[in-house]
Image (cartoon, grey):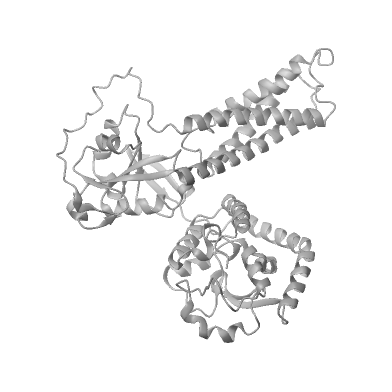
Amino acid sequence: MRHVDSFEIQPPTPPSHNGVPRSAWARARRRVSRWHRPYTAILLLLDFAAAALASFISIQSFQQASSGFYGADEDPTWFYTVAFLLLPLGWLVILWGNRAYDRRYLGLGPDEFKRVVRGGVAVAATVSFLAFATKTTGLSRWTVGTALLGALVLILLERLVARFLLHVVRRRAGQAGHRMVLVGTLPECLEVYTTVTRSPGAGLVPVAIHLTDGYAAARGIETPVPVYAGRDVLALVREVGGDTIAVCGSASAEPGELRRLAWQLEGSGVDLVVAPQLTDIAGPRVHIRPIEGLPLLHVEEPTLSGPALLVKNLMDRMAAGLGLVLLIPLFLAIAVAIRISDPGPVFFRQPRVGHEGRTFRVWKFRTMYTDAEERLASLVDQNETDGMLFKIKQDPRVFPVGRFLRASSLDELPQLINVLWGEMSLVGPRPLPADDGDFLGDVRRRLLVRPGITGLWQVSGRSDLSWDEAVRLDLYYVDNWSLAYDLSILWRTIGVVVARKGAY
C-alpha cells in the first residue's frame, strides 16, 4: 500500500487540442493494448478448424453426403472444396460480420457466445438460401444439419476453452489484459479499483489513479496503486505504461471535459472507458438512449416474473425429478456410509427461510454427530465467519465421512427434493436458517427469489467469503438473474466442486 503524501504536484500542461489539427486522412495509431490480435488470430484458426471438423464428421456419418453435387461421383473435388474450404470460410465471414471477433466481447461476458449463436443461425439461413437459389435439391438434410449444428457446438466449445486459457494467463502471468489509469475522486477510483480487481480473469489491471480534486483530499490515505494529481492524463498514461483511461463517477459528469479528453486521445492508441456510479447492475439491464447528444443510461427493472421465470421453474422440476431417479444408487451408498460412521438418521432437516419469507425444511445428508446441537454452545467463540453464519474449518462435530460429503458437496444433493416440491431452485441465493433473526434491510431482498442448491456465492468462494460479500453476490444475482446466467453458474459449479473451494 502507498501513501499519497509522498509526491509533488506537476504543473498542468497546456489544454489539449480540440481535434481540428488532426488530418481526417491521417491513419490512426495502432492501439497500445495488443493482446487481442494474436488471440483473434488463434480464434480464426480454431473456428476454421472446428467448421472443417464438423464437415468431416458429417461426411463420415452419412453415406449420402455428396448427393446433390454435380459430378461428385466422378470427381469429388468441388464437393470437398465446398465442405472443407468454402463452408468454413463462410463461417468466418459471417462470424466476423456478427462481431464475434470484436475485442470488446472477447474474454468476458456472454456476448461473445451470443454472437456465435447468431452467426450459426445466419450460416444456416445462407446455406438454405444458396441451396434454393441453385436448385440443389439432392442435398442430404441430415448431412447439412449435422455439419452446421456440429460446427456451432465445436466453435462454442473451443471458444470456451480458449477463454479459460486466457483467464489462466491473466491470473497467473498478469498478461493479456488492460493497464488502466483511473480518473476521478479518490473514493470513486477506489470503488472502481475494488470492483474490477474482484475478477482477475477480466484482465483489467489498474496501475495508477489521477485525482480530479487534488491530492490534498487523499493525503495520508493508503492506496493500492500510485496516486497523481495535476498531470496531463495522456502523458501520465504513457509514463506508467497504461493503455486505457477509466473515467470514474462524477468525473464523467463535468460538462465538456469528457468530450475534450476523447479528442485528446484521438490517434493515441489509448482506449477510453467510462465507469458510471452504477454498481452491481448487469449489462442487459442498462441501455443507452441518446437524446439531443446526451447519452442517457436507462436502467430496466429486474425480471422477477414472466415467461422466463416460468421456464426456470419448469426446468428446475424436470431436472430435479430426473436427478433423483438417476442418483438413487449414490443415495443408498451415502446412506450406508453415514449409518456406519455414526448411528442415527441419514438425513438432516433444518428450518430455512425461502421465497417471500416462507419457512420450509431443507433436506441434507447428515454430516455431524447426533449431539452436534448440544455441542454448539461450547464452540460459538471459535466461529471463523461473520454475519448470520457459523462455520469452523475443522469442526469437531463433523465425522470423517461427513467431512468428505461436505468437501465434495454431496451432502447438498437431497435438496433436489426441495426443488421438486417448489421450495428451492437449482440456482439461487443460499437458504439461511430460520432461527437467525429477522431479514432486515438489504438482506431481505434475497427472499424475492427461491433459494438455490448452488448460486453465485458458491462459485465465488463459498465459506471463504465474508458475510457482506456473500450478501452482495446474492443481491447481484437477484437483480440480474437470467436463464443464461443460471446455466453459467451451473457450469462453474462443476469446477468449484471438483476443486473443493471453500467447502468445509
Indicate the quadrant where residue 425 lies. Answer: bottom right
Q: Nearer the viewer, residue 223 or 17?
A: 223
Residue 290 drawn at (x, y percent): 37, 39
Residue 87's x, y, as percent? 67, 24
Left or right: 157, with 136 as reference point: left
- Give whichever of 303, 248 is nearer the camera: 248
Asked if one can make out residue 422 in the rendered structure from this viewpoint, the answer is no
Left or right of 75 on screen, residue 224: left
Relative to 384, is 12 on the left or the right?
left
Q: Is residue 197 visible?
A: yes
Residue 400: x, y in percent? 66, 73
Up-down: is 242 above or below 75? Answer: below
Side (left or right) of 217 relative to 348:
left
Q: Residue at image x 30%, y 39%?
A: 240
474 shown above or below 146: below
For image coordinates 64% across by 40% down, the residue present is 157
